[in-house]
Amino acid sequence: MALIMREAIRHEKFLEVIAAQRFMVSPEYYLDVYRPIYNTNRMIFPASMHFNSDIVGAKTGFTNNSRHTLVSHGTRDGINLISVVMRADHRDIIYNDTRMLMDYGFGQFERHTIFYASGFEQSVDLVQRSDEGALVIGNMSIHAANDVVLSLPIGFDTSSITSHIQLPTRVAVPFDEDFVVGRIFFEYNDSLLGQVGLLPTQPGIALTEQELSALIVEAEITTYYVYTDHSDNLAAANHLLNISLAAAGIFIFAMMMLKVLRFPRERRRQTLGNYKLKYRYK
């Protein structure tokens, strides 16, 4: 239930539905009159004795086996929590237990800013593809999309959080300003805690053919073209060349051996022919 709620609250429409106290069904959907549908979660009604301002919304339920149940989503000071209560004999219990669980959970965590976007500075080369290859046409700064703020247990040692960046050294144009060039990942004991996208400071606009031609003429192309590693292709070509040379060597060796083997046979045939010829003349 907690996993289902965690996925559901990522959708704005679901949050809107569970926070609504009442919904009116239009006449075209139910006979000829408006039909009100009321939320059964008492914790979102200010007039209720079970009202709790931390609760964004919840889903009530009841079966004979699980009895009264309540799966709730709450938020306080930027911390989001999910609580699950089952097998309550009556509804007052699910509301009271939810309040106690939420109060306990909010008391166990605090917010930490582990990354500030303003402190990040990087740049990448801009390249544009042409008939001659990929040409470096400039350089662009990259910025982080936002700060990274995490809800961590009170007393957690934030220095134990590791980070690694994934950012290429060059990016091909064109691209939009919201194009995610790379990311920074934050982990603890090989578990992903958060991430932030790295964005360009402006759109990457490709040069026109005239501008590209002028750039090629004005600069030395060898210093502007991006080196392309063809080592894999060269290795494959060398491998094919070695196979071809080996096959040629085997063929030449086979021909030489065939000639050696045929030579005594030809001499025997020639000697036998001479003997028969001499015998016939005698």
Image: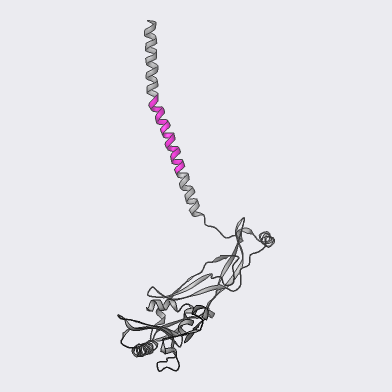
> For the stretch drawn in magenta, what is the main secondary structure?
helix
The region drawn magenta spans 243-262
> Where does residue 27 sit, x and y in percent of width and height?
52, 81
**As drawn, 203 above or below 273:** below
Looking at the rendered image, the quarter that the C terminus falls into is top left
**As drawn, 131 above or below 27:** above
Between 213 and 260, the one nearer to me in the picture: 213
> Where does residue 211 sit, x and y in percent of width and height?
68, 62
Q: Residue furthest top?
A: 282
| Residue drawn at point x = 44 percent, y = 34 percent | 252
Residue 161 showing in the rendered view: no
> Where does residue 65 sit, x and y in percent of width and height?
30, 80
Total number of numbered discs in the rendering: 0
| Residue drawn at point x = 38 percent, y = 88 percent | 102
Looking at the rendered image, the quarter that the N terminus falls into is bottom left
250 with respect to 170 (left or right): left
Between 202 and 3, the one nearer to me in the picture: 3
- The answer to which image quadrant residue 277 occupies is top left
18 with respect to 129 (left or right): left
> Where does residue 160 sit, x and y in percent of width and height?
39, 79
**As drawn, 63 above or below 239:** below
Q: Is residue 197 magenta?
A: no
- The answer to which image quadrant residue 43 occupies is bottom left
Between 149 and 86, the one nearer to me in the picture: 86
